[in-house]
Image: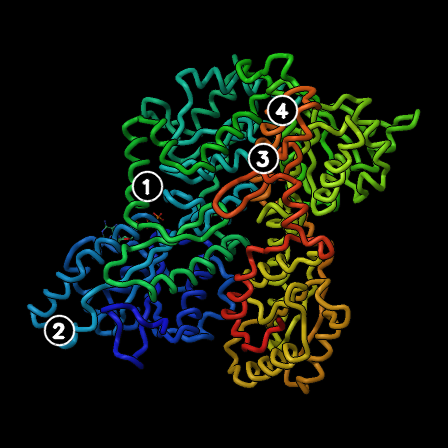
Amino acid sequence: NSNDAGDNAKPEGVKKKIAIMTSGGDSPGMNAVVRACVRMSLYLGCQPFAVYEGYEGLVQGGDFIKKMEWHDVRGWLSEGGTLIGTARCMAFYERPGRLTAAKNMILNGIDALIICGGDGSLTGADKFRAEWPSLVEELVATGQLTAEQVKPYTHLNIVGLVGSIDNDLSGTDATIGCYSALARICEMVDYIEATASSHSRAFVIEVMGRHCGWLALMAGVATGADFIFIPEKPREDNWKDEMTSVIEKHRKLGKRKTIVIVAEGAQDRHGAKITPNMLKDLLADKNGLALDTRITTLGHVQRGGTAVAYDRMLGTLQGVEAVKAVLEATPDTETCVIAITENQIVRKPLMKAVQDTKEVAKAIDAQEFDRAMDLRDTEFSDQYKSYMMTTRVQLDQELMLPEDKQMKIGFINVGAPAGGMNAAVRAAVAYCLSRGHEAVAIHNGFAGLARHHDDKPIGSIRPFHWLEVDNWASKGGSEIGTNRELPAEAGMDVVADVIKKYEFDALFLIGGFEAFHAVSQLRKARERYPSLCIPITLLPATISNNVPGTEYSLGSDTCLNELVNYCDKIKQSASATRRRVFVIETQGGRSGYIATLAGLGVGASAVYTPEEGISLEMLAADVRHLKEVFAHDKGQSRAGRIILINEKTSKVYSAKLIADIIREEAHDRFESRDSIPGHVQQGGVPSAMDRCRAVRLAIKCIQHLETYGKKAHDKIREDPMSASVIGIEGASVVFSPMKTLEENETDWPNRRPKEAYWTSMKEVVDILGGRPTYQRPE
Ligand code: ATP
C-alpha cells in the first residue's frame, strides 16, 4: 500500500492529506509543480490541498487552505507565475506564527507539506518540521487542541522543491524557473544585439542574481557577450584595463557591437559593488574606447511569461517525485529536497542543500571567492571556463599549446539542422584558436567533402575565421551547411583521400543519427584507410534525440519549446468553442522522445509513440475517455485537448485518421482536428539551454581530441575512445566508445538507442493527463 507511511500512517481507508504551497519569489514552472502534486496525490489515493499565498495562507488558514480536485489544475502548465499565489510572510519567522500554522494544518487533517520555493522558504520549512513536536505539545498544553486531535500528527512530513529563477540553490543543477528566466534574458539580449550592431553601440545589461551569477554567466555563454561580471568570481584588480583591452581587441577584429552582462550582485575583489553606470562611464570614456554606450536593466521581465518546456518538465517530474517521497517517508527519514543532477531527478538532504547555499553567500561576503566557486556545481565552473575560453580568443598566451601539439581539426555537420549546431561550432572554433589549433570548416557534410576531391575545389573546405563565427551563438540552422549523405555513399575512397590530402589530425562531427552512422562507418573503414586513423568525436545534435550514448542531443530542447508553444497556441484557439481535441503529429523519427516530452509540457490527453505503437483497444479506450471527459465537463475547461502522435508511430493510424475517428465517435458533442507543425519543430533561434550546452560540450569534444595530439595515426586503432560520442548520461557528461555503442547499444533498424531513459516519463504523461489504463501491447 503506497499510503503506508510508517508510524505516521493513518488508519486504513483514511486518505493521506498532502498540502502543496509555493513560497518566496514566483518562478515559471511552479504551476507545473502544483498540477503534478495535485494529480499525483489523487492518483495515489491521497487528498491534495493547495495552500494559497505561501506561509501567509498557512498562518491565516480558512479559505487559504483549499481542497484540490483533478480539474482544478487544468491548463495550469501554460500559465506563468504561480496560480496559488506566493507571499513573504513575517509571521512565519516567529514561533507564534508557526504555532497557528501547525494548528491550521491539524484542523485540516494535513499530514504532509510540499513546498516549492527558494532557500528562505526551505529554511522556514525545515525549522517548522524540527519544531513540530513541540508545537503540537504546546497546542495541547494551551488547550487549543486535544490530545486525541493531535494523535495522528506527531510528526510532520516535509518535502522541498526548488522554485527560483536565480538557480541559486546548491545541490541541484537547475532550479524550477531558471531556464525560463535565462530564455527571456537571451531573447532580450538577442534583440539588443541587433540594434547595438546597427549603431555600433555598446550595451551594459543588468540581470538578476544577488548572490548567484548563474543567469549572468549562462546568458554570457549563450549570447557570446564580450564581458561578464558575477558575484562568485570577481575579476582581478586590473579588471578595468582587462575589460577595455578585451573589448578593444574584439572591436579591432571588426565587431560592431559590444555586450557586457552584469549580475545585480557583481562586485570587485574587495567587496565594492560594480554598477552598470560605472561600466557605462568606462566604455564611453572619451579618452578610452569612447563607445556610444547604453544601459538596459531587465528587471521583472526575467520572471515573466510562461515556463519553457524544460521548466514544465522539471516542475512536473519533481512534483511527482515529491509526492512519492512524501508517501515513502517515515519519521526517521531525513527531510529531502528534490534536485536534478545533469539528467537525473534525485532526492537530497534538504538542510545540507540550504546550508551549502548559505555558505556561498558567506564566502562571497568574506571575499573567499575560490571557495564560493567550489561550492557551486561542476556545470557552473565548467561553464565559467568555457566562457573565458571562448571570449578571450588569442588574448591568453598561456592557453596556447606548443606548436608540435597544435592540430588541424575538420568540422562537419551531418543530418538535419538542429538548434545549437552553430553555437557548438562557434565555441569549438574559439577554443581551437585560443589553443593554436587550425579549425577547418568542411561545408555540406560528407557530400561537400567528397565534392572537394575533384580538380576544381569549390571552396567546401576552408579555415574558419573568428569574426565570421562570432555571431553564430544565436543562429539557427547550420551555417557551414549540413547533409545527410554518409561517407560510404559519398565514397569512402574519396573521403579518406581528402582527409589525407588536407592532413587532418582530427574530425569533429556534429549531427544526429546519420552522424552517428557516419562515425561508425569511418571507424570500421580505418582497417583499409590509414588516413582515417585519426581521433573522431561526435557531438549529438538532432531534434529527435535518438543518438545512442547520450540522453540529450542539441536541438531537442529548442524543438520541445517550439512544440510546446505551438500546442499552447492551438489549445488557446479552441478556448471559444472549448470542445475540441487536436491530434498533432510530431517529428522524431522512430523515437517517441519529443512527442512524450512535449506531452509532459502541454499536459497531453494521450501520446502515441513508435516504441509503444497504437492498437485499436488503445484508440477505443482513449476515445471513450474523451467522451466521458466532455460529458462531465461543466465548462471548467479553458481550452482544447491535445493528443500527440509521433510521425512514425503507425503506417495506418495517422493524425488525420485518428482525428477523423474521434470526430465520428463524438457525434457532434465535441470537435476534432489534426495538425502538423512540420519543420517549425527545428526551431528558429535555438533555445538558451541548447546554446549553453553546445558551448560546454563542444569545448569538451575538442579537449578530448586534443589529448591525441598531432599525427596520432599509429596509436589510434587500438584506442576505443578514438572514435567516440560525447553525451549526458544520468548524472554525468561522458565520452562513449563508438565500437561499444554500435555493437551493443544501438537498435539499428529503428535508428535509436536500445534503451531509452525517458520511457518512464510516458507513464507520468498518462497519469497526469488522466488517461485510462488499458492493456498495453507487449
Ligand atoms: P527567493 O529565492 O525568491 O528569495 P525565498 O524562498 O528564499 O525565495 P524568502 O523571502 O527568503 O524567499 O522566504 C519566503 C518566506 O519563507 C518568508 O517570507 C518566510 O515566511 C519564510 N521563511 C524564510 N526564512 C525563514 C526562516 N528562517 N524561518 C521561518 N520562516 C522563514
On the question of residue 426 being in view, the answer is no
Q: Quadrant location of residue 586?
A: bottom right
Asked if residue 737 is positioned above or below residue 58 in the image, the reply reads: above
Asked if residue 691 is positioned above or below residue 642 in the image, the reply reads: above
Of the numbered discs 4 and 3, the one sitting upstream in the chain is 3
Q: Quadrant location of residue 15?
A: bottom left
Res 599 label: none
Relative to 542, 264 lies left or right: left
Task: Tell me residue 137's x, y (percent).
Answer: 11, 65
- Nearest to viewer (mark 2 / mark 4): 4
Res 145 label: 2
Asked if residue 547 is positioned above or below residue 640 in the image, the reply reads: above
Identity, as a three-letter code, of the amino acid under mark 4: Tyr
Res 695 label: 3
- What residue lies at 61% left-to-right and 32% top-to-bottom? 701
Circles 2 and 1 in contact, beta carbons < 8 Å? no
Task: Tell me residue 272's x, y (percent).
Answer: 33, 25
Identity, as a three-letter code, of the amino acid under mark 1: Thr
- Quarter of the image with the N terminus is bottom left
Of the numbered discs 3 and 1, the one sitting upstream in the chain is 1
Indicate the secondary structure of the residue bearing disc 4. Answer: loop
Say few, some or many: other residues with alpha carbon within 10 Å of mark 2 (under 14 / 14 to 19 / 20 or more). some
Of the numbered discs 4 and 1, the one sitting upstream in the chain is 1
Question: Label 3 to label 1, Cα distance in Å?
Answer: 26 Å
Circles 2 and 4 in contact, beta carbons < 8 Å? no
Indicate the secondary structure of the residue bearing disc 3. Answer: helix
Res 708 label: 4
- Quarter of the image with the C terminus is bottom right
Query: Pointer 1: what residue?
Result: 357
Depth check, front residue: 113 or 211: 113
Question: Label 2 to label 1, Cα distance in Å?
Answer: 37 Å
- What residue lies at 41% left-to-right and 19% top-to-bottom? 236
